[in-house]
Amino acid sequence: MQKVLVVGGGKGGRAIYKILKETAVMEIAAIVDINPEAEGIQLAKKEGVPTGTDWRPFLTKDIDIVVEVTGDEQVFKEIRDARHKDTVLIPGSVAYLIAQLMEEKKELISELKAQSYRQDLIFNSTSDGMVGINRDGKILLFNKSAERIIGVRQEEAIGRYILDIIPTSGLPRVLETRRKEMNQELVLDNGVKIITTRIPIVGENDELIGAFSVFKDITEVVNLAEELTNLKEIQTMLEAIIHSSDDAISVVDEHGRGILINPAYTRITGLTQEQVIGKPATADISEGESMHMKVLQTRRPVRGVKMRVGPKKKEVVVNVAPIIVNGKLKGSVGVIHDMSEIQALTKELDRAKRIIRNLEAKYSFDDIIGEAEEMKLAIEQAKLGAKTPATVLLRGESGTGKELFAHAIHNASDRKYNKFVRVNCAALSETLLESELFGYEEGAFSGAKRGGKRGLFEEANNGSIFLDEIGELSSNTQAKLLRVLQENEIVRVGGTKPIPINVRIIAATNVNLEKGIANGTFREDLYYRLNRMPIQIPPLRKRKEDIPLLCERLIQKINQDYGRNVEGVSQAAMEILMAYDWPGNVRELENILGRAIIFMNYHETRIEPKHLPVLVPKRDQERFESTPMTSDESKNLNDLLQEYEKKIIQQVLEQNKGNKTATAKQLGISVRNLYYKLEKFGIAMNDMQ
């Protein structure tokens, strides 16, 4: 058996691969492509054939044939120079031609088989009996309906003389007279009464070939007549079904002119029958091409095409199929689905998922929003950490989402069906924290619970424990935590017996542990144990491109909490949010949005600059933080902030000599927002003089 190496895994390579796989005299040694996702590579992997991205390791002297299908002349030359003298190299053009010819041959054979099958299917599926004889009177054709009506099996009739099977048949007479006999009644030996038509079969040179008869049981004709009487009722029923559909339905004729629409069509598109019936299929389209016309041209259905229809440019999804009767194209039928309903259902589903996660107090990586490169890196590192039992140290400023990462790591690990325990190390005193973490024995201290108490490490056994603000631990607690990491066991307060545990530790800190080591407040050995897999979560000021996505998700959450229906943030307000440096990170952003929504009127659907507090960009904050302010004890904080904001705007206007565009740019707000604030504070240009 000859060994073949296929170089190139694209469409041509895949075709060559499939042909060679069906050949018994050849064995595919490997298939190679620089793109590991090429369709030929993927197919070979599924079938266990070796694959690679470089052909050189596979080009050994055992290879008999190399098929180069990349189309790259340089690759062809390199293979030609590197091959063994006995190895045959087939260029891509020849291989592709062979593949095309083989595919064409397969298609022709398949088409021939399909055509033969369709002919047999039609011949045997018709309700009419059909019998054909040659000029000697022997039966050549005998379909299933003839078998059913006459009561003789097909195998018994083929090759027999016609009068032996049907003694009253008139086909021998047709052979003699060469005349047609139309709609003749005949009673068969089994008592069945039929109506038959007999015709002679004559060749091109007027030679008699045989005769053929088509017949029908009169009982079936009577049934057909009854069905015809019910045709009007069926038509009425079909129209009622079409008109009751919630999906818009439109039908056009073979020329692309409208012949039928239902009420749902008018409701979704806004177009009446007068605007559609008899009009071209393009009459309802506001954006996109007519799928009716495309189907009429190709005679093939289309599915899931997005477009806009009607005067209101309604966004819809369209499915259109051809109407073919007796092999002739009679038109096409289209079904239009309203995308707004689908989008509403999708939003409702997302909301339900978030509610479920909130009820379970769990988060996954799907809840972490981040398109910035630094955030993507942190997410990828966290996903890798979730698949290992290693201790994870989450580092980042307050409000960056360290606890969210801890939840996601636990839920993506093999411990997700066990407990996830959260501990804020800075919220408890040293004594209380130690007893909470490690538990205590009975009598360990005054007020100790009878029988002792299990600690949080024991509660989290086989699960995960999240130690937030790990840098706040005392030296004594650090030593005990080090023992847990080294020995996988704890000792309760007041006890001596070690208790084995299997806990995954996820720690988090917003302080510089390295400085703590230098100052002697944090153990160096514990640091190295915790810092096995550090993940740095970037602050919001370093990933401002995520602010629009965060706003969208946070507004959905706040809407749910406060029962509001705010749609989003205006462009002017978004510019203010993007210019701010967010020292409080995502937590501060959520606070700002929540405060804005609380003070919005119920008829307002978008957050505008007027809803936001004064958010001074860092560069402007540093510039004006030394500016003296006079305060009046009778004024509240909001009044003081308003005065401060007015003073800032006036000073920047003066610096820019009244140029509003330059002032807005320097303040990091839009010109429109600046005009709003000038009017709000009553700042006129003559005040600048």
Image (tube, rainbow, N blue to C red):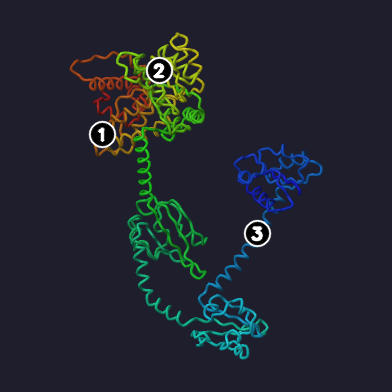
Specify whether residue 289 is in view: yes
The disc placed on residue 106 is: 3
Q: Look at the picture and state if 540 lies above or below 154.
A: above
Q: Residue furthest top?
A: 519
Contact? badges 1 and 2 (CB < 8 Å): no
Q: Classify 10 Å Cα crowding around label 1: few (below 14), some (14-19), many (20 and above).
A: some
Q: Are marks 3 and 2 in contact (CB under 8 Å)?
A: no
Question: What residue is shown at x 48% (from left), y 56% (from top)?
Answer: 302
Q: Residue furthest left?
A: 634
Separation (CA) of disc 3 from disc 1: 69 Å
461 left or right of 179 in image: left
Task: Give the residue type at disc 2.
Answer: Arg
Query: x and y percent of residue 71 in the render?
Result: 68, 45
For residue 387, side relative to residue 613 (left or right) = right
Q: Earlier in the sequence, mark 3 or mark 2?
A: 3
Per the rendering, the mark at residue 600 is: 1
Q: Which x, y percent locates residue 177?
A: 61, 91
In this view, 633 is above or below 420: above
| Horizontal relation, residue 611 to residue 181: left or right | left
Residue at 44 percent across and 51 percent down: it is 306
**Crowd tier of the residue under label 2, counting other residues whose Cα lies within 10 Å: few below 14, some 14–19, many 20 or above:** many
Circle 3 packing at 10 Å, graded few (<14), some (14-19), many (20+), is few
The amino acid marked with disc number 3 is Lys
Residue 371 position in % (x across, y down): 46, 32
Label 2 SS: loop
Residue on which disc 2 sits: 492
